[in-house]
Image (spheres, rainbow, N blue to C red):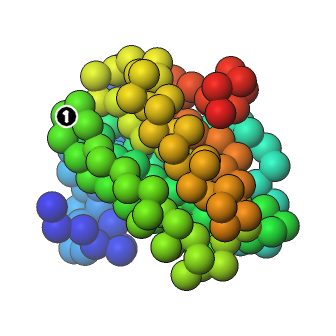
Amino acid sequence: MNTNSTAALSYDNMNDAHALYVRSPSGRYKPATDSQILAAGREAAVSLISMENAMGNPQRVRSFFQSKLAGLGHECAAFLYLDTQLRPIRYIEQSMGTLSHASIYPREIVKTSLRLNAGALFMAHNHPSGLAEPSPADLAMTRQLKQALALIDVRILDHVIVSATETVSLAERGQL
């Protein structure tokens, strides 16, 4: 996909199709493809987090991860690293997987946490199947990661599972 930082999306409310358009560098508009719409949404997701404000709003965190991960055709494990005041340091998609699995290595998450001097983090991964329910493997991996991070005094605040239409928070379910 060829991306252009000057491309713009617009909404056509003149008909029932509710089409989105992409403007090319020459100024011409053409209907946006699904991948262009999803890419624009991922870019816009950055506005859901602020580097100055603490990430204390669980709905904003879920919306951020859903904007970043929904619609991907493969599993992706992503982390939002935070300082001790819960302000974002960096968002990293650390593992790209297959249709049904993304490998997460606690050692790599610990190394990244130390390198960024993180005090806490949010984790998320998507389920391309469309079901946001955590699997037994998801729960086991979350427990392992929580134990590994506890050794270096980094808190895992939530593990969010994302589908195209919903999110599930393990913290809110008491499964963290």
Q: Amino acid at mark 1?
A: Leu
In this rendering, the answer to whether 84 lies above or below 31 is below
Going 26% across and 37% down the picture, which residue do you hit? 101
Label 1: element kind: loop
Measured as percent of width and height from the top left, residue 98 is found at 18, 41
Measured as percent of width and height from the top left, residue 96 is found at 27, 52
Lateral position of residue 125 relative to residue 169, left or right: left
In this rendering, the answer to whether 149 lies above or below 57 is below
Going 51% across and 44% down the picture, which residue do you hit? 144
Measured as percent of width and height from the top left, residue 50 is found at 71, 65
Number of numbered callouts drawn? 1
96 or 4, which lies in front? 96
Q: Is residue 43 visible?
A: no
Going 73% across and 39% down the picture, which residue do you hit? 58
Which residue appears farthest toward the left when viewing the image? 1
Q: Is residue 106 visible?
A: yes
Give residue 9's quadrant in the image.
bottom left
Measured as percent of width and height from the top left, residue 53 is found at 81, 64
102 or 47, which lies in front? 102
Q: Which residue is mark 1?
A: 99
**Quarter of the figure with the N terminus:** bottom left
Q: Residues within 10 Å of mark 1 (few under 14, many from 20)?
A: some
Going 28% across and 72% down the picture, which residue do you hit? 4
117 or 55, which lies in front? 117
**Quarter of the figure with the C terminus:** top right
